[in-house]
Image (tube, rainbow, N blue to C red):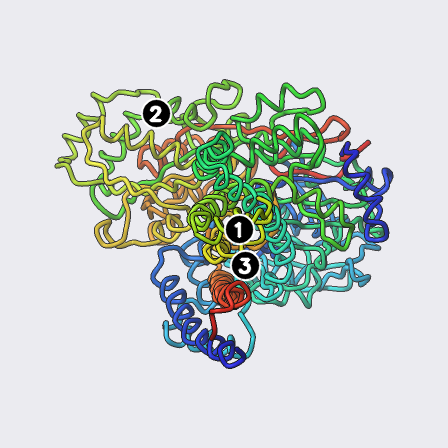
Amino acid sequence: MKSAGGAALVAASGGLAMPALSQGASAKTLRFVPQANLANFDPIWGTQYVVRNAAALVWDTLYGVDEKLTPQRQMVESESVSPDGLVWTFTLRPGMKFHDGSPVLAKDAVQSLIRWSARDPMGLMLRAIQNELVAVDDRTFRWSLKKPYPKMLLALGKNNSPCSFIMPARIAETDPFKQITEYIGSGPMKFKKEEWVPGAKAVFEKFADYKPREEKASWLAGGKRMMVDRIEWIIMPDPATASAALQNGEVDWWENPISDLVPVLKKNRNIEVDIADPLGNIGAFRMNHLHPPFDNVKVRRAVLAAMNQEDYMRAIVGDDNNLWKPLPGFFTPGTPLYSEAGGEILKMRSLDAAKKLLQEAGYKGEPVTCVVAQDQPNTKAMGDVTADLLKKMGMTVDFVATDWGTTGARRAQKTPPGQGGWNMFHTWHAGADCLNPAPYTAIRGNADKAWFGWPNSPTVEKEVENWFEAKDVAAEKVVMDRLNKAALEDVIFAPTGFFLSYQAWRKNVTGVTKGPLPFFWGVSKA
Amino acid sequence: MFAFIVRRVIATIPVMAFVALFVFSLLYIAPGDPAVVIAGDQATPADVEKIRQGLGLDRPFLIRFGEWLFNILRGDLGISIFTSLPVTQLIAQRIEPTVSLMAVTLLLAISIAVPLGVMAAWKAGSWIDRFAMAFCVTGFSVPVFVVGYLLAYIFALQLDWLPVQGYTPLSRGLWPWFENLILPAITLGFVYIALIARITRASMLEVLQQDYVRTARSKGVGEMSILFLHALKNAAIPIVTVIGIGIALLIGGAVVTESVFAIPGLGRLTVDAILRRDYPVIQGLVLMFSFVYVLINLVVDLIYTLIDPRIRY
């Protein structure tokens, strides 16, 4: 800060003033503006992305998915699986320590996996087929199953929330539906609980005893070498403030600049702007399969036939064509299992076809209760487009403008729309969650157990099962084509398109990579 | 006087009890569910229900209210649903930035608004008066966030004189503390200055018509003495009242100002808690704000006795 007045006042205030951080100390502190407030810090209890992103600094995982989407060993030194695929034995790397100085033992991994598996969809599947999960000795544990589970390493290394973070056993014994209060991991950074001001600041300090792997870092895999001593997460609810702070050099890295402010940041010669996560996001709106009119598949198909994804995407990202693409399917484009099978209906964009389907379905003008969270720019933008679309189709729209907290509570109601329920709500999914059916709860068609909207599609469920049993990528790909087609035929939900977002950082910061979460290892500050 | 203070303090108890019941009931019937926010977007309805049970949100209203009230009587405002930290700790973490912001704003506003209002009344109808009133209309009309962005753009981004955001505790030095508060205090003070200046002008205009002012002038008393020693003291009651009432305005304005300047104060804590439905935090904050407001009213009443010796309690 260049301020003569300031210098004078410092001098005048004499003994009251404390020296600011020296240049060297400042250079070792990375100031980061995250996407949201770190309101809690239990990555199993609270599954928000921001919690996972912070947790990846503090807790390590047994495996980590790399940029090729392949799980690699992380805390594990080696593993073996019995020829029948039923018994997995894992050996931990030697010499790993928790932040409290205690060694990382197999019993810690076992207890952590027990807690994680109570909350994670893949973990729940493993629980359902589990014989036993036990520590054999200090470094070895065994997981025996009733039937083979080919996706074991993906389950342990995936970056979807909740990740299977390893905690000391005494902490992992906490009920998975209650929050932990000690934040001790074995990851590359320690969490400074005493400096945590929820809603304002979270601080992480380099863990001196962390032993990174030898391999080059790649997403959650490889050697997590920290190049800074301290990372400060500064929560900024106002994007304009974050933008100004980045331009002014008060922060170093901003995770999610809104598209309106990106042109300003791009013009600044001290700032680098690039795509944040190549896996992007998938916009969506869900229709309630339990109540008219969307209990009729023809009405759901009518909506798909009429919609134009470009309208949705432009409403979200504006005119930047680099930030979106149409998505005639449900899975993340550019990834190995992406499929467009059955996607023709999303390319029709025909109001006439939609009206014909509505007529066939016997739609008689029943109101559609469309719940739209106005405090989330993405849902608001999509909600406005949908309301217009439904009206053009000749449907009666009951537009409920509300906030995300209310939407979240209302979407859980199974009662008819007139009694506190709903017909439609908008959301979006991180592309990293839509690579395959494992973490993708939104694609499931298991009726009462399905995600909000409760679609009942035995065909989709059969294909999800087939995918879990597929032995290789080729077999998975065949299944995924069938799954995508079935999900579109039954209209599990309506994908509104694929969109990306930017991240921005000061040019004195190097090593920032693209990925589904901000990876701090390898990032240095001049 | 002592008896009056005791009576007023005792009178706050039913007020606070009503506020407590009102806030608790309001949150109970308000839509939204913290368990949904905690569980995240991928959670199943069953997960949400288990979290709700874990938080005790499935229990009957009266049991929850009774427990909360009992804890308040012991000085325990509860535990935040999201952070698992005590509400008192969260408030303690945030109180310094907000108190600092309000104190600097108050100081700034009074020191600008009162002379401005006095001058406007003294030179009623002149360009000074018109300028002062135009300033007041602008202050009332321009939203706080617009003033904030404008100031940040000019003084932080363009001139690089002041920081855009953040708060530095006073323990780290007077200037670092003050530097972070200049822009937020001007932003927050803008409407407050307008309010106080208008009331000062109106009150002074009335007093300046009084006979004793004419007498003072005829005795040759200097204009500044008449304005600031004689007239202002007699015009002070409505000014002090509006300053007290205006503190509620400051609390509301602090919510926006703290967001615009990323100040980790009570205003932001309130907004965050409401958006997440963090019931214990909302209840604790509303209760605290109510108490502060009642206290301010008491202080204002006591100041009356200093200004006007005719007032006795």
Residue B145 in the image, given as x and y percentages of width and height = 51, 38
Residue at 65 percent of width and 42 percent of height: B182
Mark closest to the chain's N terminus, 3 or 1:
3
Residues tagged 3 and 1 counted as in contact (Cβ below 8 A): no
Q: Nearer the viewer, mark 2 or mark 1?
A: 1
Residue A382 drawn above or below residue A20: above
Q: Nearer the viewer, mark 2 or mark 3?
A: 3
Q: Which mark is residue A269?
A: none
Residue A160 in sight in this render? no
Residue picked out by circle 3: B82
Q: Identify the image quadrant of the C terminus of chain A.
A: top right
Say few, some or many: other residues with alpha carbon within 10 Å of mark 2 (under 14 / 14 to 19 / 20 or more).
many
Say few, some or many: other residues with alpha carbon within 10 Å of mark 1 (under 14 / 14 to 19 / 20 or more).
some
Gap between marks 3 and 1 measured at Cα: 64 Å
Q: Which mark is residue A346?
A: 2
The chain holding disc 3 is: B
Residue picked out by circle 1: B216
